[in-house]
Image (cartoon, rainbow, N blue to C red):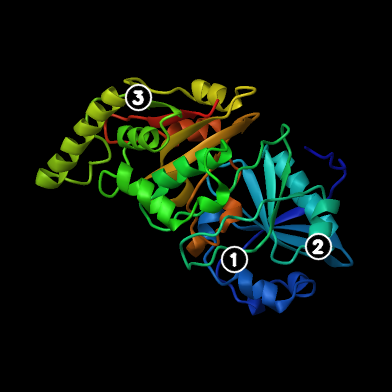
Amino acid sequence: MPHPVPSAVTYAVVPYAPGAGPSAWPEELRRIARPEVLERWGAVDRAPHAPRLVTVPGGGGWAAAALVTARPGTAYAKIVDAVGDVPAAARAVVAYAEEQGLVQVVWEGWTVSGEEAAAAGFAPLRPPLPGGTDEPAGPRTGYVRWTAGEGVAEPAYYRQSTHFSCGAVTALLAQVRAGVVRPESLDREAELTLWRDATNFPACEPVGLGVAVRRRWPSSSVEVFLDTEEPVLLDHLDGDEREWRAVLQRASRTDADRLGVPVHGRRLSLAELREAVEAPGRCRHVLLLVSLATMQGFDVPHWVLCHGAVPGAVVVEDPWFNTGAGETWVDAHLLPVPDASLDAMSLLGGEVRVRGAVLIDGG
């Protein structure tokens, strides 16, 4: 639930120098930040996420500062760490987020305690489920504060263990949230088993994913929205490599008809998507195919789970995050994406843009 912020919060936003070592930091910052904190800040190139310092004046320099980043095309700000007067830094970041029209502030739990976060109006995030990858997943704890709306119910978070199993993971996360799958049963075996049933090698296209969900959970209501009858996600292929995958996509449509999975040959609108995930008393989820060009800088298709909405933004679970740019699970969990951004990034293809979505209704 949003917490009021005092109107008279004085702060300044200072550019961050990516890759700069501790000795390159301003004296005002080195005076209030521990060397190991600054070392972690400079250990990765955070430039793709517009890193900045939100500072609070005091004592002839800075009384507090916070390193703040965020994915492009989203509606949140992330506090990597707050140093100096931590409560003052948190108030400053929240005020900054509100002035920027952001709906959420999250806080990585590298150095902040649960008590400090709670005192600043932040709620603890559920720890992520154990994943099937050895890549570092970030801090053990994280915190969230909504600045718009009441927030949304928090699902479990799980990171995909491969570069191609995002569709399977989003479907499993939807079923965990619906109570169909136990959280402890979501592991790499479950992930790869569902991916094997849904894959078009290696990607999961919308019809095949919808069919795999119905096969795995026959009692789940599943609908597919895809505004083309042509094969999708094959623009990077030609010749036989394209044709045999197209054969499998046609077979998926036959399976959908046999299993009673509706395949709507039209585009799911953002208004319909919001209506689905906001339906009172229902547990409806939309698996949405997006391009990562805006959020990550590379134009590859990727599945995310849309499970809630706040004013101006849809809240998604992204089962992948970019550790090379300083991301952790805190960036990908309860991620608010403005309606216009989501509308743009969910149109894929070349000259003819299409949208693929799978609607799962848990009742």
Q: What residue is shown at x 44% (from left), y 57% (from top)?
A: 188
Q: What residue is shown with label 3?
A: 261
Give the number of the mark in front: 3 or 1.
Answer: 3
Residue 310's quadrant in the figure?
top right
**Above or below — where is 65 with respect to 274?**
below
Q: Which residue is mark 1?
A: 17
Q: Is residue 311 left or right of residue 223?
A: right
**Which residue has dot 2 on it?**
64
Kindly check if marks 2 and 1 are in contact, taking CB atoms under 8 A apart as contact: no
Viewer-side label of 2, 1: 2
Q: Position of residue 304 (x, y in %)?
A: 47, 41
Toward the viewer: 310 or 173? 173
Q: CA distance from mark 2 to mark 3?
A: 55 Å
Q: Nearer the viewer, residue 292 or 171?
A: 171
Direction left: furthest residue: 239
Q: Of the residues under marks 3 and 1, which one precedes in the sequence?
A: 1
Is residue 10 positioned above or below 243 on the image? below
Q: Are marks 2 and 3 in contact (CB under 8 Å)?
A: no
Q: Measuring 33% from the left and 22% from the top, which residue is drawn there?
A: 260
